[in-house]
Image (cartoon, helix red, strand yellow):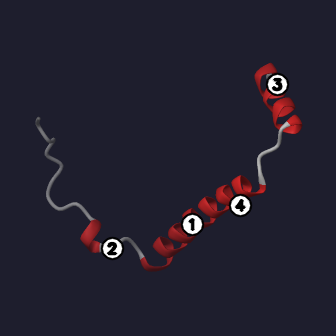
């Protein structure tokens, strides 16, 4: 079921759509995230970025 807030948001978006540059920026960010995810899946997580030690909590 559609929420009234979402219907109003869609109405405003349809009346005033984002610029082409904003759309391309969002797609670029999504593409970069997918590339990083694919790199991690293909080559694994770098050992240098893995935390060392036990599960001792950090005290302030």
First along the sequence among labels 3 and 4: 3
The quadrant holding residue 9 is: top right
First along the sequence among labels 1 and 4: 4
Read off the residue under disc 3. 8
Q: Is residue 2 visible?
A: no
Dot 3 and dot 4 residues touching (CB under 8 Å) = no
Assess disc 3: are there few (<14), some (14-19) or many (≥20) residues with their C-alpha within 10 Å of its C-alpha: few
Mark 1 or 4, which is nearer the eye?
A: 4
Q: Residue furthest top?
A: 4
Provide the secondary structure element on which disc 4 rests: helix
Give me the C-alpha separation between circle 3 and circle 4.
24 Å
First along the sequence among labels 2 and 4: 4
Read off the residue under disc 2. 46
In depth, the one of 39 and 12 nearer the eye is 12
Assess disc 4: are there few (<14), some (14-19) or many (≥20) residues with their C-alpha within 10 Å of its C-alpha: few
Read off the residue under disc 4. 24
Q: Is residue 54 above or below residue 59?
A: below
Read off the residue under disc 1. 32
Give me the C-alpha separation between circle 1 and circle 3.
31 Å
Mark 1 or 2, which is nearer the eye?
A: 1
Q: Position of residue 43 (x, y in %)?
A: 44, 79
| Residue located at (56% from left, 71% from top) | 35
């Amino acid at each position: 079921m559609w929420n009234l807030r979402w219907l109003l948001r869609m109405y405003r978006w349809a009346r005033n759509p984002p610029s082409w540059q904003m759309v391309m920026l969002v797609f670029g960010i999504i593409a970069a995230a997918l590339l990083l995810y694919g790199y991690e899946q293909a080559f694994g997580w770098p050992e240098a970025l893995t935390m060392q030690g036990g599960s001792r909590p950090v005290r302030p």
